Image (tube, coloured by chain):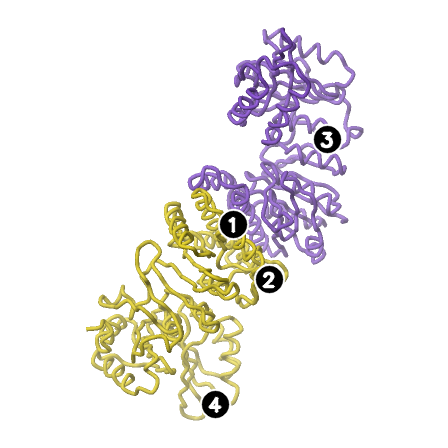
Chain colours: A yellow, B purple
Amino acid sequence: MKNLIVQKYGGTSVGSIEKIKKIAKDIVNIKNSGKRIVVVLSAMGDTTDILINKAKSINQNPSKRELDMLLSTGEQVSISLMAMALESLNESVISLTGFQCKILANEKLRITKIDSARIKKELNNNKIVIVAGFQGVTENNDITTLGRGGSDTTAVALANALNAEKCEIYTDVDGVYTSDPRKVSDAKLLDKISYDEMLELASLGAKVLHPRSVELARNYNIPLVVKPSHKKGNGTKIMEVNQVEKVVVRGISLDENTAKITVLEVPDKPGIAFKLFKALAKSNIQIDMIIQNINKDSVNDISFTIKRDYLEKSINLCKKIAKGLGAKDVIYDDTVAKLSVVGTGLAGNSEVASTFFEGLYEQDINIEMISTSEIKISCIIDRKKGVDALQHLHNRFELAGY
Amino acid sequence: MKNLIVQKYGGTSVGSIEKIKKIAKDIVNIKNSGKRIVVVLSAMGDTTDILINKAKSINQNPSKRELDMLLSTGEQVSISLMAMALESLNESVISLTGFQCKILANEKLRITKIDSARIKKELNNNKIVIVAGFQGVTENNDITTLGRGGSDTTAVALANALNAEKCEIYTDVDGVYTSDPRKVSDAKLLDKISYDEMLELASLGAKVLHPRSVELARNYNIPLVVKPSHKKGNGTKIMEVNQVEKVVVRGISLDENTAKITVLEVPDKPGIAFKLFKALAKSNIQIDMIIQNINKDSVNDISFTIKRDYLEKSINLCKKIAKGLGAKDVIYDDTVAKLSVVGTGLAGNSEVASTFFEGLYEQDINIEMISTSEIKISCIIDRKKGVDALQHLHNRFELAGY
């Protein structure tokens, strides 16, 4: 659709009545510049957390279906209030829930289809369309939510379905930085970054954008912009790699939400790792890095990292499986962090790895695990030393631009 | 459907996490007695008022569509929390919104159709079904609400669509009384009351049941029970007139939410009243009692009563119309109340009217307007004297049973 922009505002951006009124004015300004607008909203402020706490006070383990039924009210409140704010500015506007846009999502929390007919009809009636983020419906008309950060995905999926000219993600930060500016004082705001670089940074804990939304934008080549919602600023454009200035290292990140589990003395038989990781995957526990040490007497130690949130669940599961596999024991380390450098120029540049390891050596930091990809090198290190290492490597790779 | 009970719990009954947990246990007890259950819930406590205030802080006059979008979240929160409470008691349960049950409602806030297939499927899967009251969808899939008290109507409409054996309305009062127990200390709880009597009392301001729900129950002959939600008690059964013990006067009520408007010196031409009341009806202002006095010189004074909530709106409208009709002026009196006696035995019993008027005379109360129906006599009197008159007539008609 020509001249169409899809915008997404996060929970902090619409966290109060005043903020909603202010964003409404911004939307009108953009509309008056001759654009059609679809706005995707998250729930206001910490609404989702409040609702989750309410649920837990009734049932520690509510079913996903009923929790989704509850949580989806958060976005429904924001979209209706935003529509009312725009009505008070004499704009023609309509709010739509996930079921009204027929945003079909499967059990894996992924959007499988969007029936854009209703939205197109409303846009053609010259209306601003406000869509509830984070939610969809199943084929059976049950409400489902897309998981944390799902509103980003809603926005990108809508931009694709409606063939929008771009998708703008408004947030409470200025854009994407070379590193976390709360930890690295001279971190530099990036003008542009490639989809793949952003994807690695997002996966690595840079909380600006949800990885799935970046993946979706990359797959459909949708121009994405991350912008600050309540101040001026051009933010960061996320685009194809050939549109981005080539540098060796784009950014560096520290993921402190990681933990290491080691299954000790697993018999060295085929299919062992498969059985272990299949069971974890079945419980929706994502494995990040894996190493396997050949020990003595044909037994191996298998170490892997997971998000720290899932540590308890993972250990319990591993202990059960380890018994069946004939392993000796399961141990864990939740005092680790993952430090990563990301950059498209990194592929085939052997100096990056050596600078990385040298930098850690200079700080007297031991590397517990290493993993590499085309555009990323990650190391598991002691969490206590993480922030210092981050700053030191940010200097070493001259990311502040001096 | 055999052995099916539809229950409705109002906002006060599910006003807190603790109350929801308690009601969940009550539901399980009834299920264990061999019943299938559909539960209709209102929004928790004063949620609806809080949401309305939130809306007004953004837009004094939000569109009905967006306000409905906002308000319908209230019931969605209660049904999901109740489902979670029942899950924690190991019950198989599912919550359903208005759109999931396809409760079709028109612009006049009336339910026109319910597609009960989904509910029946879930009941046949041995699930307790929790349905959001107060809400439906239009043919266009827009969310609409049924107006205050709409959850009662949802319950009765579902009882009809599912062919339930009865519909139980749980509330924070013990049932239906001969008069308002907060105003008449010796008001007596009624075991039974006919649909028509209940309808008159409901319309007269006894806030136990929404009139539309009683009307619907009468039209489809659905046994209705009003019961207290958080204590023991059989409540009041509402049924066909031939199943109820015949008495002259069943109850007496005082409606303090009324006001009188008089259009002065309207030219005595055909169609004048029609034009006036049509304009009010168009603005959804319901007229209650009407009198017209023939004056002098072929001009009439037309007096009528409305709900006091609509006074300002009505006066503004009347002044506009009065001008067009050539009337002299519009005056109003918002210090009145409506006192009514209701009873099936009243039809054709001339003593009731004379006792009523005599009772008011004994209290030195002036009657400003009178209206009668088969089972009701209403008088407009000075509001200040309303409660005393109510108690006095309750004695005169010996409703306390002594």
Residue at point 41%, 92% (across, down): A296
Q: Amino acid at mark 3?
A: Tyr
Secondary structure of the residue carrying tag 2 is loop
Subunit under mark 3: B
Q: Amino acid at mark 4?
A: Asp
Subunit under mark 2: A
Asked if the residue under mark 4 is in contact with the one under mark 2, i.e. CB atoms within 8 Å, the reply is: no
Secondary structure of the residue carrying tag 4 is loop
Q: Which residue is mark 2?
A: A138
Subunit under mark 4: A
Q: Which residue is mark 3?
A: B195
Q: Amino acid at mark 2?
A: Thr
CA distance separating discs 3 and 4? 79 Å
Query: Badge 3, how many Cα within 10 Å: few under 14, some, many 20+?
Result: many
Evaluate whether label 2 is on the same chain as label 4.
yes
Q: Which residue is mark 4?
A: A268
B5 with respect to B336 (left or right)? right
Viewer-closest of A126 and A358: A126
Query: Badge 1, how many Cα within 10 Å: few under 14, some, many 20+?
Result: many
Q: Which residue is mark 1?
A: A94
CA distance separating discs 2 and 3? 42 Å
Q: Which mark is residue A351?
A: none
Evaluate whether label 2 is on the same chain as label 3.
no
CA distance separating discs 1 and 2? 23 Å
Give coordinates of residue A133: x percent, y percent: 48, 58
Name the outermost residue toward the right. B242
Secondary structure of the residue carrying tag 1 is strand
